[in-house]
Structures are given as structure tokens and as C-alpha cells.
Image: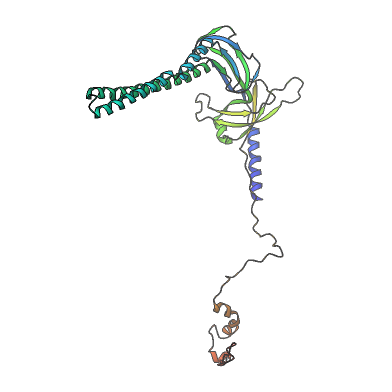
Amino acid sequence: MMRVIVFLMVAFSFGVVCCGAESIEAFTRPSDDVTLSFVRPGLIAKMLVKEGDQVRQGQLLVAQDDLAEMASLEQLKAKADDTVQIDASKADLDQKRVDFEKLEKLGSTGAAGVYEREHARLDVVIGEMRLKLYEFERMQDGRKYEEAKLQLDRMLIFSPVAGVVEQSFIKQGESVNALDKVIRVVKIDPLWIDIPAPLTQVRSLGIVRGGEAQIEFPAAAGQTAAPRATGKVIHVGAVADPASGTLTVRVEVPNSALRQAGERVKVVSFLPPPVVVIPDVPTEPASRPADETPPATQPATQPAMDLLMPSLQPVISGTGGMAPPADELNVTTTNTPTTDDASGVK
């Protein structure tokens, strides 16, 4: 309970300090703003979106004319799939091996000379190397085909974010150079606010990443009160501006209503990160159920003297702390014969 009270007192004090501080003005901006271009010159064949359209991540936006590239790609694919040279080389190599084996048999009988046999052996070696060369060239043709496909993909522009088409810099049918601006896409849900917070206030209020900020937006026509939203601090700058003594604090604000970015807003207050309060563990044990066995206060196994001490305590106390002799304790020792239960013999 004490922890909860202390936490509430700290939070209340923090809120008073924040609310008492002067509000800071800032501007909203898109949380993502990308201007896309082609990496090679070309003719714009298709403009699939227009300004103001909502686009999803990975959606195709613009395409260049790729008829010539597609024809070249088909040629590369046909060359990569062709195996005529490899098949012919294999057949020729098989024939040379057969010829070499026949000459080797003739050489054992003296019908073929050393020169003929050596020439046949070299023909086999050259045939094997030629086959490896054709296989390597086919592998290279396959790689060229894959490279051409990648180059073809670069003639398309896909949206890297889910957002809104803010601006188109070119029209269908026009030509563009490499890296010319083509289209701009912005993401306004959520919005970002870069707040120039005074460095002294950042330190005094303990503004850290993960904290919260109360943002006040301009009131629309017909609204009696300015709407407010709670944003999350996602970045606190590491370097302050020495001229103004401010530090950039970036706040992310949900924008499901898709308010336009660029509004002037006010930062009303900063709040610390949410704290999980753990209740105190009660010092007294809870009531034990009736059927629960109470915990043992003594070890399960005790020495024999510990068991005898309660019965001897009155005697020891009466003798000044010293145990009297055995005869004063009226302890009589008798030798009682024992009986074997099985035989009955004493």
C-alpha cells in the first residue's frame, strides 16, 4: 500500500510541474516521406496511380517501357536453356573414348603405334575439357538471364510504405533520366512531431524514450474545445542545439482520422513512462485452511536428550541448575528378564 501511495504522489507532482510549464509549439509531419526514382533512363509506359490515392506497401506505381528488354530477356532464356552443344560434346567424347580403348587393345598386339595411342588419349582429354567449358558457359548464360530479370525489375517502381500519393513529377508518355524525381508517397498515420524542447526542461522533467506527451491540435470550425491526443516519445536527441539551447524530442501520434500533416500543434505536457506498481506482500500470513497441517517448529528428528529435557527441568531447577544423583531421583533400576515371544524361553 505504501508503494502505491508514493507512486501516486510522485505522479501527481510530476503532472503539476508539466502542466505548470509553458506549452511548446511544434509542427506535425509524415512519419514516412519517400520520393521515388528510376535508376536508368527510359520512357514512362504506365502511371498506375494518381495524386491523392491511398496505396499499400509493395503496390506497383509506375512502369517504364520494357519491350526491348523483354525481347533480350527471351533470347537469354533460350540460350540458357539450350543444351545442344553439351549434348554434342558428350557424344563426341564417348566416341573418342571408344577409339582410345580400341587403339589400346591394338597396341597390346603391336598393331597400333605409340604415337597413335597417345594422340587418341589426348583427344579424350581435350574432349573432357571442352565438355566442362560448354557446361560453364551454360551456367554463365543462366546467370546473365537472372541478371537481366533483375534489371527488368528496376524498370518498375513499387511503394515501399503504405500511405498516400502526395505528388507526381512526371506524366505517362514522358521520358526520364536516371534518378529524376518520379513520384512522392507520404505516410501520415501515425504522425511525427519533432519538438524543440528546452534542454533544462528535458532534464528537469526526465523526458525519456517511451514516455508520453499530451498534444493539442487546432480546433476545427464549430468545435468548442481543441482536440487533444496522447503521443509516445520515440526519440530524444543526443546533441542539443547550442544556439537555442533546445533538444529534439520526437513524438509519435496515432492519426486514424488522417489529419493533414504540417499543422501547428501545442505540447501541453509530458508524462513519464507507464510504471507497473507491484503491491506489497502482507507481512502476516493469510488464514490457514482447517485441513492444512501447520509448519513444524522443530526438526522432525530430535536427539534423545532434547526429548528428556522437559521432564528433567523441574528437578534441575530445584538443585540450582545441577542434576542430582540418580539415587536422589528415586530412579530404581531392575534387571527384568526378557522373554522370547517365539519360543517362550526366558
x 56%, y 74%: residue:
302
Closer to the camera in the image, 41 or 272: 41
- Could you say where residue 256 lies in the image, as x and y percent from the top left? 68, 26
x 53%, y 18%: residue:
153
- Give above or below for 94 relative to 13: above
Closer to the camera in the image, 80 or 24: 80
x 54%, y 13%: residue:
181
- Give above or below for 28 relative to 325: above
Q: Is residue 39 visible?
A: no
- Could you say where residue 147 lies in the image, as x and y percent from the top left? 47, 19
Q: Seen from this angle, which residue lies furthest top?
A: 174
Horizontal arrangement in the rendering, residue 241 relative to residue 263 (left or right): left
Closer to the camera in the image, 90 or 108: 108
Horizontal arrangement in the rendering, residue 316 relative to residue 292 (left or right): left
Q: Is residue 243 visible?
A: yes
Quarter of the image with the C terminus in it: bottom right
- Could you say where residue 149 lies in the image, as x and y percent from the top left? 50, 18
- Could you say where residue 63 lies in the image, as x and y percent from the top left? 57, 13
Closer to the camera in the image, 280 or 340: 340
Q: Quadrant of residue 53?
A: top right
- Give above or below for 89 relative to 301: above
Figure coloring: rainbow
Horizontal arrangement in the rendering, residue 150 relative to residue 7 (left or right): left
Horizontal arrangement in the rendering, residue 283 relative to residue 64 (left or right): right
Q: Quadrant of residue 269?
A: top right
Q: Quadrant of residue 255?
A: top right
